[in-house]
Amino acid sequence: MSKSLVDTPRTFEDMMRMPVLFYRSIGEDIYAHRSRNPLKSLFLRIYLYAGFINFNLLVIGELVFFYKSLQDFETIRLAIAVAPCIGFSLVADFKQAAMVMHRKLLIELLNELEDMHPKTLEKQRDYKMDQFERTMKRVINIFTFLCLAYTTTFSFYPAIKAAVKYNFLGYEIFDRNFGFLIWFPFDATRNNLIYWITYWDIAHGAYLAGIAFLCADLLLVVVITQLCMHFNYISMRLESHPCKRDGKEADKENIEFLIQMIRYHTKCLNLCEHVNSLYSFSLLLNFLMASMQICFIAFQVTESTLEVILIYCIFLMTSMVQVFLVCYYGDELIAASLRVGDSAYNQKWFQCSKTYCKMLKLLIMRSQRPAAIKPPTFPPISLVTYMKVISMSYQFFALLRTTYKDN
């Protein structure tokens, strides 16, 4: 455990550092409303919009390539190869659109969490914040590495391969290839100038897609980590409450304590609803696309050369880890909110007044309907959801492989 984590209090901004920094690298400033430099904010906004216009033009090129490849059975494998990239791009687009459409709600959510964040070192120890932060950082580091490894490998592998062949293996021609299968209305490999401009244009589009895809999930990880920490604190306070029974003053203290906990619990539940408003539709698309992505990537892995297999294996790991990440934190949120009711029942409520017991009963009843991430038409997201997505992906994969082999 790092010294800074133990000896100095951590601010909410410290928890948000990774998603904020990565978002700013593509021009998205979550805290633009706090900026004292309007010119910088304007520049970032222009950079963001220009980047997404370029990125969506590339996505249109991928869709055209996909359509053209479907016209002939001989090129259908190319359509299958580009399909996962299209799915990834559309999910990244939708996640960013959700952030833009619900910006006010996002700012409200983050401000509320920042206000609730324990400020002093002593309070943070009471909340056991170091345990939550340590797990969160490990998850963020692993997923960030995989996501950036995927976009970097797809973007730069063709250029590195061509450079090695040309400079070290004696090839007379530098192969002008791209990492992504995209249709262009012009010859993008006609000469070096056009090729390299197009190449870096594609590389920037891939980076922007990767960051938009990554940061929405990093933001979700930070928010749910905070909510789980608050639910856990409520559980600890309820279970350790002594339930004094020394007359009216003690009963008044018990009731005041319980009212405070009920308000705290209600506030956490309301924030969970904000998270659902932000993420529900993007997560629905995410899970639907993830099933198809994993299916198409697995097909590529079983039907390609070794070098293509290695590249797509990184993509496959990224897709599977991303789905697992969302499902894991959805499961943690359900478990943390359910523990509130268990902890309330485990205290010495039988020593308290009838009024206290009735209020406690209402808290326990409310906690039986756990906080959860709920995409439309989907059950609450948990590890069971992950198993369903993987099962669905395998069914699609088996159908695709059988159909392809039969033809």
Image (tube, rainbow, N blue to C red):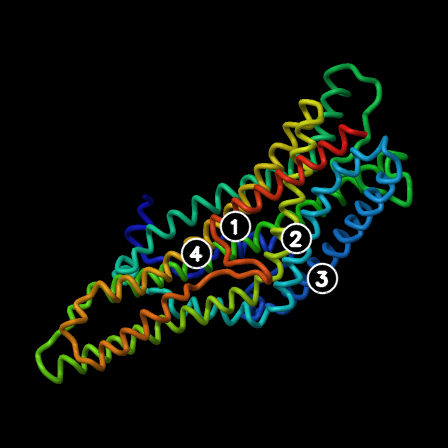
Question: Mark 4–mark 1 contact, CB under 8 Å?
Answer: no
Q: What residue type is labelled 1?
A: Thr
Of 389 and 151, the residue lying toward us: 389
Residue drawn 75% across and 40% down? 82
Q: In which quarter of the image is residue 404?
A: top right
Could you tell me which quadrant the C terminus lies in? top right
Q: Mark 3 points at which residue?
A: 46
Residue drawn 56% across and 41% down? 320
Of 156 and 287, the residue lying toward us: 287
Q: Which amino acid does label 2 sit on?
A: Ala
Question: Mark 1–mark 3 contact, CB under 8 Å?
Answer: no
Q: Where's residue 46, x and y in %?
A: 71, 62
Distance of label 4 from label 2 (alpha carbons): 23 Å
Q: How crowded is mark 2: few (under 14 residues within 10 Å), some or many (20 or more)?
A: many
In the picture, measured across the screen, residue 126 lies left or right of residue 74, that is left
First-in-chain label (3 vs 2): 3
Q: Name the residue under label 2.
A: 92
Q: Mark 4 points at which residue?
A: 15
Q: Where's residue 365, x and y in %?
A: 34, 70
Which dot, 1 or 3, sits closer to the camera?
1
First-in-chain label (2 vs 1): 2
Q: Name the residue under label 1.
A: 385
Distance of label 2 from label 1 (alpha carbons): 21 Å
